[in-house]
Image: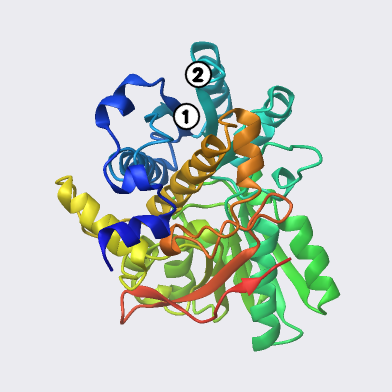
Amino acid sequence: MKRREFLQRLGVGSLAALGFSRFALAQARPVKLATLLPLTGPFAFAGNAGREGFVDGVDYVNEVLGGIAGRKLELIVEDTGYDVAKGTAAFNRVLSRERPEELLFVYGDSTGLSKALAPEIARIGLPYSATSFASELADPEKYPTIFVFGPTYNDMMEALLRQIRLQKGKARIALVYSNTEFGRDPIPYVKERAKALGMEVVHEEVTPPAFTDATPVVLNLRRANPDFVLLQGYALSVEPLILRAAREQGLRAQFMGTYYSAELVLIQRAGPAAEGFTVTYHNPYWYDTLVPAVDEMRKFRQRKGRDTSYRPTYYMGSLAVALGVAEAMRRAAQAGKLTRAGVVEYLEKIGDYTALGLTRGYQFVNHRIPYTKLYRASVKDGRFNAITDWLKLA
């Protein structure tokens, strides 16, 4: 494919495809995207990988796509430490410092922070998304400017329950989740939906988001004797510990998790105990080299002198958000509506855009993208392999 054709498929106008004037890009007022990420704390691994995805996405928009109608896209990064109070302070600091006509999008770090900020975000009409896939946030009536760039945790659990039903109709299920907003979010839905499907929830285990000994958790699971164990509210902080302890204790249940467990580090840390671990995931993996976006970003990082080895799932998700938001900004600018309201309007209209395969498409339904795939861990392959095509969850 010729480069101009490639850029046009990305949605780049002719000026950008021909090399938009970098002088003009530098002179115009910037368009700003702020990210509030856990660069320290229990989920620092995910936060720093996400930051890298935003950096690459913004650099790509400016250097390859010509910015936002000739204006530079500027990235603002603040550390939250995965702490709601610290994240709220960072949010207030950014809003007090930046001009509303320049700061057109904010990305937050968690379900807890997002729920705390949601009323103010709605009040000021600020386009917003987050690492969170909380079901409560996907409510355009209550929060008309908040978008979830993927399925909600309820949607993800629905996908897992469908798979359980295929494997064993009247299954016994155990729920293991962290005592955080992230962990608790889909639990009411899972209980209700499992009952409707004729399944029995035989045990609930509520834990801190990080701990060092999974033996008590697994002993409780052994007593409950579930067929399937659903993990929620962790980001590789404890999943490998639970899987290894389960193998050591002879627990034969199949383990499953959602988006933030769908990472190769889980296989590397859990070893043979990771075999068969099933997850929901809605972006390509860095090893999916047949996806055009993956190949393009490898080449872009190489030109920038950046490491081209495996990039985590958190990188891929952040990159998809950065390019999706930038596309909405570009389309809003072309329509003469490069404002916060314009970005919201065009996020709702970019269902035909896929960022060359970074998502199935930005087809928001009730302000979330209700599609995912299921993947299963293969220790032999050292990766997660897809076991379904796209599943529609709404």
- Counting every numbered tag in the picture gives 2
Q: Is residue 196 above or below residue 140?
A: below
Residue drawn at the location 80% of the way across and 68% of the way down: 193
Mark 2 residue crowding within 10 angstroms, few (<14) / some (14–19) / many (20+): some
Which quadrant of the figure has residue 341?
top right
Judged left or right of residue 279, residue 316 is left
Pointers 1 and 2 in contact (CB under 8 A)?
yes
Residue drawn at the location 29% of the way across and 55% of the way down: 297
Judged left or right of residue 315, residue 120 is right
Residue beneath disc 2: 94
Q: What amino acid type is highlighted by mark number 2?
A: Val
Identity of the residue furthest to the top in this view: 96
Which quadrant of the rendered structure holds the N terminus?
A: bottom left
Mark number, residue 158: none
Which quadrant of the rendered structure holds the C terminus?
A: bottom right
Any part of residue 180 in sight: no
Give the image location of residue 154, x and y in percent.
70, 59
Q: What amino acid type is highlighted by mark number 1?
A: Ala
Mark number, residue 34: 1
Give the image location of residue 372, x and y in percent.
58, 67
Q: Secondary structure at mark 1?
A: strand
